[in-house]
Amino acid sequence: MGTPRARLLARIAVAAVVLLAPTTTCGVAGHSRALRPGGGRGQQQPSSLFPANATRAEAIERQFVEWVRYVGGLRHSTFQHAVARASPSYSLVVDKDPALGDFTTIQAAVDSLPAINLVRVVIRVNAGTYTEKVTVSAMRAFITLEGAGADKTVVQWGDTADSPTGPKGRPLGTFNSASFAVNAQYFLARNITFKDCHVHAIARDYGALTAQNRQSMLEDTGFSFVNCRVTGSGALYLGRAWGTFSRVVFAYTHMDDIIVPNGWFNWGDPNRELTVFYGQYKCTGPGATYAGRVAWSHELTDDEAKPFISLSFIDGTEWVRL
């Protein structure tokens, strides 16, 4: 039989053959609190998430949830022919106890994959708090990170943009301060919490939940948060206009009362108010009240929300075969 890694490497050779055939456009799916792994006990079926009289937008979002369950599972691979011939899917287990898993850290599990990964690999992270800085390199695609539950599996680290741990003791900067950085495509995470470590802050300005760096109308990028929950212990904006054409939408999301009433920050450049696109759709909770939002944000209609909660937002209809 050989080792699991050896079997995986052998299967990659089969999967690579498919690259000779025409390929499809790639996309990336984000984490949503409502997404549950398929086939497990306690799984929440789409019918319970969305009633029979659901609106068209809700029906579209149900399709999105079903798709994430499918594409994040071991049975899925973009390379359909390789799946049929070799079933090139694989799973690893991370546990703080070496006797209960393949690795004791998430980074070690990621690093164990081939430098160029072509098959869906599910990394199951057992309950616990994992204090580590994790980076997924650009070519290690097709990773599903699956925790034991949002309240059971926590990943945390303590860097900030001002941390003096960059080259030659320089500040890291925003980009390099990420606790969990994913540079690869087809990454999915579910049933897990990514937690920031806050020690003390003396700044008067609020923080921001997102900083999306879309620089042109031609860029097909943006952040869409569907069925999420925003909690915390300090006031913050939903987003700041890092990019001139920054685009962020929150849908079906519960927000605690930590959200600054006006919601969004132009990052000191009023001109960006004319070009960014920030919106909410059917969000709930004390922090979701739209009445105090800045005039240049949007309370989306069903039709306006549709592109952000459907497969088309990540070109899923092109590269995912349901």
Image (tube, rainbow, N blue to C red):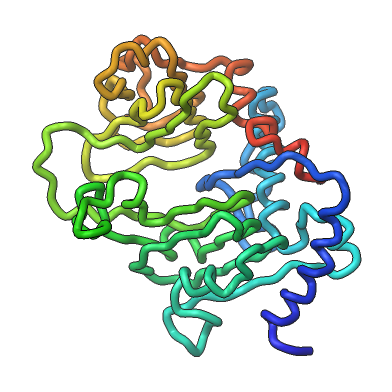
Q: Position of residue 177 (x, y in %)?
A: 31, 52
Residue drawn at the location 38% of the way across and 34% of the way down:
211
How many marks overall?
0
Which residue lies at the image location 47% right of the left edge and 58% below the top edge? 192
Classify the position of the N terminus by image quarter.
Answer: bottom right
Q: Which residue corresponds to the image point at 36% horizontal and 56% vertical from the top-left?
A: 179
Residue at image location 71% in from the left, 31% down from the top = 52
**Residue most extreme to the front:** 168
Instruction: Locate residue 24, reporting x and y percent.
Output: 78, 41
- 9 to 242, vertically: above or below: below
User: Residue 220's x, y, as percent?
Assistant: 59, 28
Tell me the quarter of the picture where residue 167 sits.
Answer: bottom left
Task: Identify the image quadrant of residue 243.
Answer: top left
Place residue 258 in its image quadrant.
top left
- Taking depth in this image into account, of 24 and 293 the one nearest to the observer is 24
On the image, the x and y values in percent for residue 143 come to 61, 60
Q: Is residue 55 above or below residue 29?
A: above
Out of 219 and 206, give the one closest to the viewer. Answer: 219
> Is 316 drawn above or below residue 248 in the view shown?
below
